[in-house]
Amino acid sequence: MTKLNLPTLYRDATRVPPQDADLRVTTDELLALARGESLGARQDAAVAGLAASSEQAVAARIALATQSWADDLAAELADLRRPTWTERVVAWFKAATLPPVFAAGAISLLAVAAWRVGEPAVAPITAPESVLAADDALFGGDFDGAIAHRSDADEVFGGGFDS
Amino acid sequence: MSDALKALLDKHGKRLRMLIEVHCSRDQGLDPDDIEQEVRIKLWKALDSDKNLVAAASYIQKVVVTTVVDAVRRAQVRHAESIEDKDEAGFDPSVSGPMRPEAQAGRGQWSELLLRCIGELPERRRLPVQLALQGFTADEVARLTGASVTAAQQLCYRGIEELKTRLRELGADEIED
């Protein structure tokens, strides 16, 4: 009984790289095909090259399969390598062709600014008394001395209670 | 930076290994662990030596593709060196019994017969069938050939059925696709 596996047989039969130079696909062409770009006049020959060579086919399949993986890794690498604020300032100073005097002046200004920003506030703390008095509604009314000194007899017991 | 880069490459390395395993390790003699390790080392070296290198997706893919191609070539050399000692992998060695002369042909002969049968297919089916046998899905065949997915599926299916019929006539008893 003869049992055949067509893909295995075909890939075995196409292990040898194509003799025809037209059918040989470069890595850049493979990546362009994987991105769905057209190779123009080379398109048909390149696709025929993938069909005719298991080596090129496996490379193309990997290029197709790793596209989103490569996008994700590239994005995360870019995040990782993004320079910090300090690095960007340093790079700016290096890149800018300021005369040394201006550069020194700018550094001094930055230093003074940083010192001013970092210095804690030392203004005297004063209690806002007048504001408190004006806002205090509990003691806002006038004190009526006449009521306080009233010595009328009690009214609960009809004035009959004699303490 | 180095620790963060290592962690990042570790994380993405696992996914790459899985992709290689799914897409090309079965019959190409490739080791996904080896390829992942090699890709990781190449990326690490490139990123470590050039701090300003912007590793675009295309650059990363290029590293992967060249690594896979190198691995395929190494595997082919190993395969060529050991081919005489191996059983004919296209056949089931556990099956014994009388074989027809056609069926006694070696794997190489069956490969030649297969190529001849593919050559006899109608032209519009030939390329889709070849791409399907190389492992491309119908979606990928459609993308590469510019056909619709439905057309690609039909061309591949009918072409492979035609191949099976022809190979059965030539003596193959059981054919997997």
Image (tube, rainbow, N blue to C red):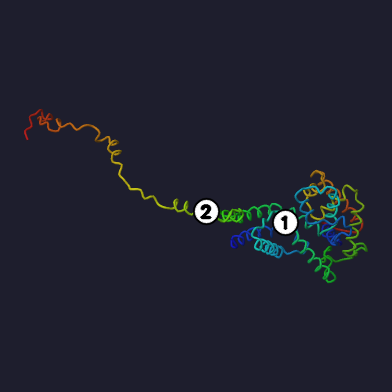
Location of residue B49 by image quarter: bottom right
Residue A111 image offset from top left, x and y in percent: 48, 54
Location of residue B86 by image quarter: bottom right
**Residue B35 shown left or right of residue B174 in the figure:** left
Q: Chain of mark 2?
A: A
Decide: few, some or many residues near mark 2? Use Cα within 10 Å; few <14, some 14-19, many ≥20: few
Three-letter code, disc 1 = Gln
A4 vs A141, nearest the viewer: A141
Q: Secondary structure at mark 1?
A: helix
Residue B171 image offset from top left, x and y in percent: 91, 59
Could you say which disc has been placed on residue A89 in the image? none
Location of the N terminus of chain A (image quadrant): bottom right
Are labels 1 and 2 on one chain?
A: no
Q: Secondary structure at mark 2?
A: helix
Residue A31 image offset from top left, x and y in percent: 76, 53
In space, the residues marked 1 and 2 are separated at their CA atoms by 47 Å
B173 vs B3, nearest the viewer: B3
In the depicted structure, whether residue B151 falls above or below residue B47: above
**Residue A75 shown left or right of residue A107 in the figure:** right
In the depicted structure, whether residue B113 falls above or below residue A144: below
Decide: few, some or many residues near mark 1? Use Cα within 10 Å; few <14, some 14-19, many ≥20: many
Location of the C terminus of chain A (image quadrant): top left
Three-letter code, disc 2 = Gly
Location of residue B148 by image quarter: top right
Q: Which residue is denoted by mark 2 in the rendering?
A: A105
Q: Residue furthest bottom?
A: B85
Q: Which residue is denoted by mark 1 in the rendering?
A: B61
A103 vs B88, nearest the viewer: A103
Residue at (91%, 59%) from the top-left corner?
A: B113
Q: Chain of mark 1?
A: B
Count of numbered tags: 2
